[in-house]
Amino acid sequence: MIAPVSRLRIEKVVHGGAGLGREEGRVWLVPYTAPGDLVEARPVREHATYVEGTCEEVVEPGPDRVEPRCPWFGRCGGCHLQHLSREAQVQARRGILLESLRRFGRVEGLDPEVVAGDDWGYRGRMEFHVGAGRLGFFERGSHDLVPVEDCPIAVPEIRRLIPDLGRAVAEAGVSGPANLEVVVGADAAVVVVGDGPPGWFPPTLPERLTALRGVSGILLHTRGRYWLPMGRPTVGWDVPGPQGRDVRLDLDPRGFSQANVGLNPRLIETVMRLAAPRPGEQVLELYAGAGNFTFPLLAAGAPEIRVTAIEASRTALAALEQAGAEAGATPGGLTTIAGKTETVVRKLLDGRRRYDLVLADPPRGGIAEAARHLPRFGPTRIVLVSCEPATLARDTATLVAAGYRPDALVLVDMFPQTAHVEAVLRLVADPDRGTP
Ligand SMILES: C[S@@+](CC[C@H](N)C(=O)[O-])C[C@H]1O[C@@H](n2cnc3c(N)ncnc32)[C@H](O)[C@@H]1O
């Protein structure tokens, strides 16, 4: 029996991108709805505290509803908010950030500044999936393939490549399941990284891919065996460095790089503005990657600043060290430590190290347990860069309990058309609380 529809007025967009409405006090979450919409929704799943619904009809559109630009929007799981105006989207991501800080960290009273860039054509890394010889993205919440021929949030280098990539996959007879990730550098290098079960790629695929217009290198994984590189399989990335010169990072595309290539310089600027590194300071940088913030820190506090950069990926750290050597980062100015934050932080504490500033840019899971230890380094400021508001809230709450006070928050709008939120939050040692 098909469940009857319910009529709901959508109040706001919540974490994950769904619209929230209520029926007789019961909360409903309905994807692809907009604040102010009157919708008819059908229940899909009942949870303890809410009903997950699907929108059957928009009876009365809310004031911020717009026509989505992409023909695959609503089926492809990549974007959540193309049906909202630019202003309403920023408002939604701001709301998600503040609501998460309040609910999961009891952090209130912050008014985030917003740093934004292009709404379209910004994404410089995209993971496509291959199934039955076709290239596409996964449907929302499933592994069903939605074949696509374009993606308007991708940078032009990727958009141009999608039809050719689709043809190469079909003609080479890649049956899948496999993943093809396209990574573009700030230097416009384009690398295709492919992965799948043993024997996933037919012998003709590597040459077909390297012959594609615009592709500068490939890396294909023969699962559990080795990587096949062809062409130039790295992407270049420029960040501000000492003596007013940019430092060129040579990134392995299998590791992390910021997805929004165009807004990364503004992200760096924001992090440096909040961190305000000064000459002579000791800085602890956690989750340093290949040095996206390390060199700007060294530049901002030149020449006497000391930065200790911790990173778990040896490949990323090797790129950081090589760039440091080429940039002539002052001996003693930069110390790198390979290892997991959780472990390295404990060792540094055993060595009774002190730092003036801590900067952390963790993956979605946040800094977790390390948050409890950071105050013992005695920093006057701790700056957290986060792509997951819920863990940012949890980590902030831990630091607040240890005597720090959040005093600045910036939403760096790295993921337009989606419900993903990137934020930079600064905490300062609270003199009234007496930092440990
Ligand atoms: C969000 S990225 C940030 C990298 C860099 N700050 C940037 O802007 O490019 C997170 C980084 O943390 C590293 N990482 C993940 N888990 C880690 C851990 N437990 N300890 C240290 N580094 C870790 C990843 O390899 C990745 O380089």
Image (cartoon, rainbow, N blue to C red):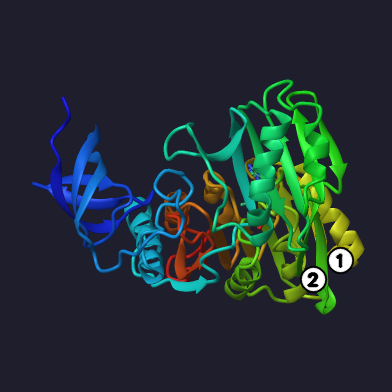
Residue to which mark 2 is pinned: 241
Q: Is residue 433 left or right of residue 41?
A: right
* Residue at mark 1: 329
Q: Tell me if label 2 and label 1 are in contact, CB under 8 Å.
A: yes
Residue at 60%, 55% (x, y): give it.
361
**In this view of the protein, which residue sits in the foreground, 137 or 372?**
137
Tell me the tag on residue 225.
none
- Which residue type does callout 1 highlight? Ala
Q: Residue at x 64, y 35 (%)?
A: 179
Q: Quadrant of the N terminus?
A: top left
The secondary element bearing badge 2 is classed as loop
Image height check: is 299 above or below 415?
below
- Local SS, label 1: loop
Relative horizontal placement of residue 231, taking residue 24 as reference (left or right): right
Separation (CA) of disc 2 from disc 1: 9 Å
- Distance from mark 2 CB to nearest ligand 1 atom below 8 Å: no
Give the number of the mark in front: 2 or 1.
Answer: 2
Q: Is residue 390 above or below residue 240?
A: above
Of callouts 2 and 1, the N-terminal one: 2
Q: What kind of residue is marked 2?
A: Gly
Near-viewer residue (68 or 114): 68
**Residue 292 picture location, percent across and down:** 71, 61
Q: Does any portion of residue 99 appear in the rendered image?
A: yes
Quarter of the figure with residue 379? bottom right
Query: Residue sitting at 48 percent across and 56 percent down?
Result: 399
Q: Is mark 1 within 8 Å of ligand 1?
A: no
